[in-house]
Image (cartoon, rainbow, N blue to C red):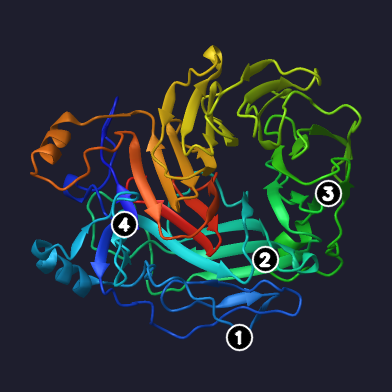
Amino acid sequence: MQLANNNKKKSSKRKGTNSSNSSNTKIRSSLTNNNSNGNSNNGNSNTSKTDLKFEDGGFPDIIVEDEVVNNDNEFAMPQKMPSANNNNKSDNNNNNNNDNNNTTRVYRPGKDTMGEDEKLDFDPTAYKLYHSMTASWPCLTFDIVRDRLGVGRKRFPVTMYMAAGTQADKPENNEIILMKLSDLHKVQREYDEEDEEDEDDADDLDEDPILISKSIKHIGGVNRLRSMPQSPNIISTWSDTGAVHIYDAEVQLKSLDGPALPGSKQASEMPIYTFSGHGQEGYAMDWSKAHPGRLITGDCNRNIHLFEPVGNANAPSWSINSSTPFSGHTASVEDLQWSPTEKTVFASCSMDRSIRIWDTRQHDKSQLVVQEAHDQDVNVLSWNSLVGFLLASGGDDGAFKVWDLRNFKADTPVAHFKYHLAPITSVEWSPTEDSVVAVSGADDQVSIWDMSLEEDREEQGMIQSGQIEGIDDLPPQLLFVHQGQRDIKEIHFHPQVPGVIVSTAGDGFNVFRSCNM
């Protein structure tokens, strides 16, 4: 399921697993399914077509529309994903006894193959937090909704809010799902004296996680969904019908915390704004962090449109000059990112392999451009919110790169990694660690990188000499590898809970925090 790395930071040594456990991904022969504890209580509602449930052993209560109900539908997690919260001491002991027979070994994606009777085994020592959940329809895009519970919170259990968009079988069955995930407890494992939170947290590991959800009908599949940072209840979507919608989900989000008070505003499933000027569908979308309410969208016809906020908080609206889109790309615009500090500056990437930097005051020409940023389509971008001159990109070539905008020249990234074996599907800088970036790929891996790490020569010497188990051909910046999902599409760091990452894939969501984050 995972691979953790311990290399030295240039300034200090990062906490992590022992060097002997630097690779925690194992193959176990004839692994049995340990996800058999407890009864399954699943969510269902007449007003919500998408059934959500946690897949941690001993299924929790699922509350939908303020009721606890049962669902006969089963959406079982793959057998290769045993529960993170199951105690597998006996299995671990068996592994130790069988190491000499090579029944348990490090799994290297792209190099090793698994037999028919083998599957990936979950190693709880590699995670501080791990939960998974599934839905009846794939949610290939989501966003973490900022809350009022505080910034920089590290105590367990974790509570978080999310919004996701579905890809259903019929256009009319699609939804925006608002979720509250609570009682997300840390992974059960033996006491670790390096885990500073263990003594302070009043964490009952027997408690089940709780999921509460509300839904908003959405015509058409949701290609991309984003929550406005300054007003998280304002949610924008890219529909596969070719329209961009903006919703006010304030009532739905408040209802996740309890019933509405008498006289409160009524919930609406209609968007407060719709723009159909693109003419065809798209995927690129981003809200400005420096200018509240400013939105940019890009389509498959290479056009980029700017949404300028007008009106007020009580009656928000937007103005778009659809006749003058930002033009310069020669193929589909795949992703857009606003500068974290500049109100008028944003970046774009395209199937034409280029990355461009724009100023909203000039529509017909980008300010900076790398024509051949990747060998194939450039799929995703992420602008570092803590170091404003760093931009990360990922492409169909399986590579991700880091660019210094102070020296933005053709084919001169400051970092270039080609670890993934398939196209990059998502990339995002950590909002709390300026050197950490997470990357997901179509090879069903989420990799976490620390650009400040350098090779630990002593440890590398021990690996090469066979004194400790490890993989000697991994980049020293590779911090952790998470596996177990199929068809991973999007990842996000939680902006208020350091180290927590959420990933969505064709088979559901994972919420996790690695041992070395």
Dividing the picture into quarters, in which one does residue 341 lie? top right
**Element assignment for label 1:** loop
Q: Earlier in the sequence, mark 4 or mark 2?
A: 4
Residue 335 is situated, as x and y percent measured from the top left of the image, at 65, 37
Q: Quadrant of residue 326?
A: top right
Q: Which residue is mark 1?
A: 70
Q: Which residue is mark 2?
A: 256
| Mark 1 nearby-residue class (10 Å; few <14, some 14–19, many ≥20) | some
Observer able to see residue 196: no
Where does residue 272 sit, x and y in percent of width and height? 87, 51
* Residue 105 percent across, percent down from the top left: 20, 58
* For the residues bearing labels 3 and 4, Cβ distance under 8 angstroms: no
**Residue under the point 22% across and 43% down:** 471
Tell me if label 3 and label 1 are in contact, CB under 8 Å.
no
Query: Can you identify the residue that label 4 sits on?
Result: 198
Tell me the element at label 4: loop
How far from the left and from the top, in percent, is residue 68? Answer: 62, 82
Amino acid type of the residue tagged 1 in the rendering: Asn
